[in-house]
Image (cartoon, rainbow, N blue to C red):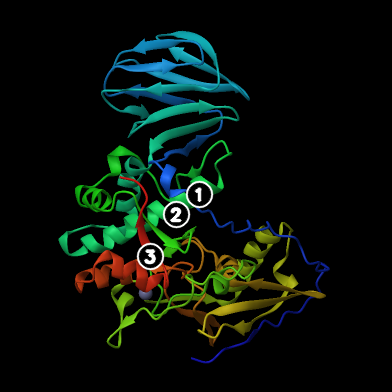
Amino acid sequence: MRNLCILLILTFFAIFSCKRMERPSRPVVKKPTYKKEKFKEPELKVLLKEGKGPFHISATSKYMLITKSKKYSLKAGDFLKCEYISFNQVALNYAGKKFVFKTPFIFESKQGYVILNNRRYRGRILFDKGEKVINLVRMESYLLSVVPPEIGGVRPSLIEAAKAQAVCARSYALRKYLERKDNLFHLYADVKDQVYLGRDFENPWASVAVEATKGEILMYRNEVVLTMYHSTCGGRTADFREAFPAMPYIPYLRSVKCNVRGKDLCSVSPYYKWERKYPRSVFINMLKRNISRIMGINLNSKDIKSFRISRRSKNGRVFEAMVRLGKGNQVFKGNEIRHIFSDARGALPSTWFNLIQRGSDIIIKGKGFGHGVGMCQYGARELSKMGWNYEKIVKFYYPGTKIKKIYN
Ligand SMILES: [Zn+2]
């Protein structure tokens, strides 16, 4: 398909004079290493909730409330309503009475699980300053609930893909743990890092994959690999800087063909090919709404004069898109481009797309789902079905890396 430039001819002059706006800066990529001889399974701090609350606490067995100076015993049926009343104070409602506790304090159940807002969690629950509710959980326990939603329905033929996912999720979490060692927490429990939903979302097959790879991470020389992954690449993964142009070059996050014997591995994915169609006015309105949000300004539909794909990467992804706004141009790069096309379904599935004008409609035809960097999860599932082991799968998507067991 050829590149198509779409000119939106509008009748009014813009009232907005375009300035290049600052967008949130991206974090610098550190290269965390580890000291093998001293390394033990880490206890992660996973942010579960943030805000005043209320948060409802109970447990499946007897449990403890532990403060700096005291321990309080509670029974399985004891329910507590916890609400932050200041930066480091929480009001606890128990059996109709109100108590005020200073953070930090912990809920722990040695025989069972602590329940937070109807979800069971392994490990302990920490209430900390700044209205944060954090799960203190060992790495291997954390992974039991991270692997299932990431790799989808696990069955015997997909076990090697689940093991590959376990190694990736462990490496990612370890890298964040090392990078954010001095922070209040190491990981978010959602797509900002990895989705973690607690004990109720574990699955026996994924647990087998986690146990079989215990302590194994992916290394590149002495660096813990930044194991980025995504749903569907569309036939070829993206270079790291194709998706995130402001970031440094990372040799193992380079584009690879997701193809074996002439067949694209992720061609079974519902997002291998996709299409979105809009009447022109809806398309313009979508651009106006999203660009206003991203730039933090108030645009009018008439401010958007034209939109065009100004640069493609060598692999065919849209690398740069230019929007002419009144007197100035606004350039969007890499993965950010997906967000100027956000609609009720979310961001555009990928940056691998073409724009087609047909009558008064604008059609976006594309391939893949996600940023495209690192392991393609649909591709990994296909390789697993073909009999590849997890080591071969991760080396395929992260060239030049190797698996290391860093604790038992
Ligand atoms: Zn793929």
Q: Please indicate whether residue 183 sits to the left or right of residue 46 in the image.
A: right
Is residue 193 at all visible to an observer of this figure? no
Residue shown at 18% from the left, 59% from the top: 155
Query: Would you call the spot at circle 3 few (<14 residues within 10 Å), some (14-19), or many (20 or more)?
Result: some
Residue at numbered disc 3: 402
Please tell me whether residue 109 is drawn above or below residue 138 in the rendered image: above
Front residue of 248 and 263: 248
Q: Residue at x 56, y 79 (%)?
A: 318
Q: Are marks 2 and 3 in contact (CB under 8 Å)?
A: no
Q: Amino acid at mark 2?
A: Tyr
* Real-space Cα separation, disc 1 to disc 2, in angstroms: 6 Å
Q: Which residue is mark 2?
A: 172
Q: Position of residue 148 (x, y in %)?
A: 29, 52
- Please say if 278 is above or below 127: below
Q: Are marks 3 and 1 in contact (CB under 8 Å)?
A: no
Q: Amino acid at mark 1?
A: Lys
